[in-house]
Amino acid sequence: MKTKIYDIKNLRGDLTGGLVAGVIALPLALAFGVQSGLGAIAGLYGAIAIGILAAIFGGTATQASGPTGPMTVVSATLVAAAIDFAGSVESAMSIIVVTFMLGGLLQIVFGFLNIARYIKYFPYPVISGFMSGVGIIIVLLQIYPFAGVSAPKNTINVFTELPRLFGELNLAALGLGIFTVIVYYLFPKVTKLVPSSLVALISATLVSYFFTIRRPINW
């Protein structure tokens, strides 16, 4: 049995990849925690836990585990249904925890049974349609935070609450979002040695910190 020795040539890529994944996953986890109603700290703990568990039990050396959009859409539906049934987040917490634990146990069982090998039988249009639909939902829900306005609770409200979007528009937050997008797309023209997502996140964070972009600027 041959023991695989780590290739030092991969060190730079591994460090960069880990840094980018961590920096991007951190605010994403905080945002998901806030959006879920459980608070930013819940999202942070969730990201830490999944990173540790994936490193211990993960089946691939190239796996990057963290908050993900598609599962957020599915989880949000479950959480909303549980809260609607129980009446409040506190009352629904036991239902939510048990449901997710059961889902995790089923995933472990599916892993031992190698159920994943059947994914090749799923038609490509089904996978593509699901991922595209999730992407569209996420983009629509991010329009409001991009403009510095609290996000609606569901996709339908994105359209029904449009007057609120223009009435509560935060020009400072909107400018910061546009600045982040510009840095993300233009920085690779300068150099590709540093990931543009990392540069955009750090630069936008510094701009927000030093200019204290907090209070909304309305029309």
Image: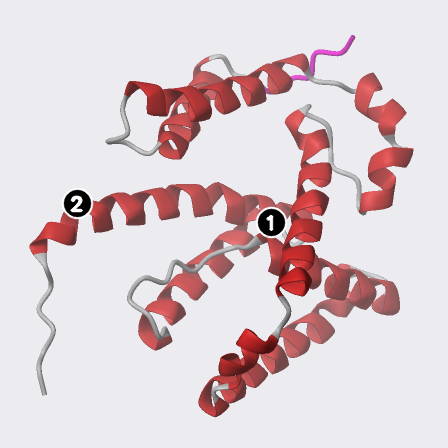
Counting residues from the start of the chain, the first of labels 1 and 2 encountered is: 2
> For numbered disc 1, what is the local secondary structure?
helix
In percent of width and height, residue 3 lies at 9, 78
* Residue 118 on the magenta span: no
Locate residue 159 relative to residue 36 in the image: left or right: right
Which quadrant holds residue 140?
A: top right
Q: Which residue is mark 2?
A: 12
**Mostly what secondary structure, the magenta segment?**
loop
Q: Tell me, yes or no, whether the highlighted magenta stretch contains residue 215.
A: yes
Left or right of 54 on screen, residue 216: right
State the image coordinates of residue 192 (x, y, percent, origin top left): 28, 29
Q: Amino acid at mark 1?
A: Phe
Query: Total label count?
Result: 2
- Does 102 sit above or below residue 123? below
The residues tagged by marks 1 and 2 sit, at their Cα atoms, a distance apart of 30 Å
Task: Read off the magenta span.
Answer: 214-219
**Which mark is drawn over residue 189?**
none
**Residue that badge 1 annotates:** 32
Identified at 27% across, 31% down, the residue is 194
With respect to residue 84, does 108 lie above or below? Answer: below
The colour scheme of the drawn protein is secondary structure
Question: Between residues 163 and 217, which one lies in front from this camera angle?
Answer: 163
Q: Residue furthest bottom?
A: 113
Nearer to me, 188 or 54? 188
- Could you say whether the residue bearing mark 2 is in a helix, strand or loop? helix
Q: Residues within 10 Å of mark 1 (few under 14, many from 20)?
A: many
State the image coordinates of residue 25 (x, y, percent, origin top left). Answer: 45, 47
Q: Would you say 8 lies left or right of 116 here?
A: left
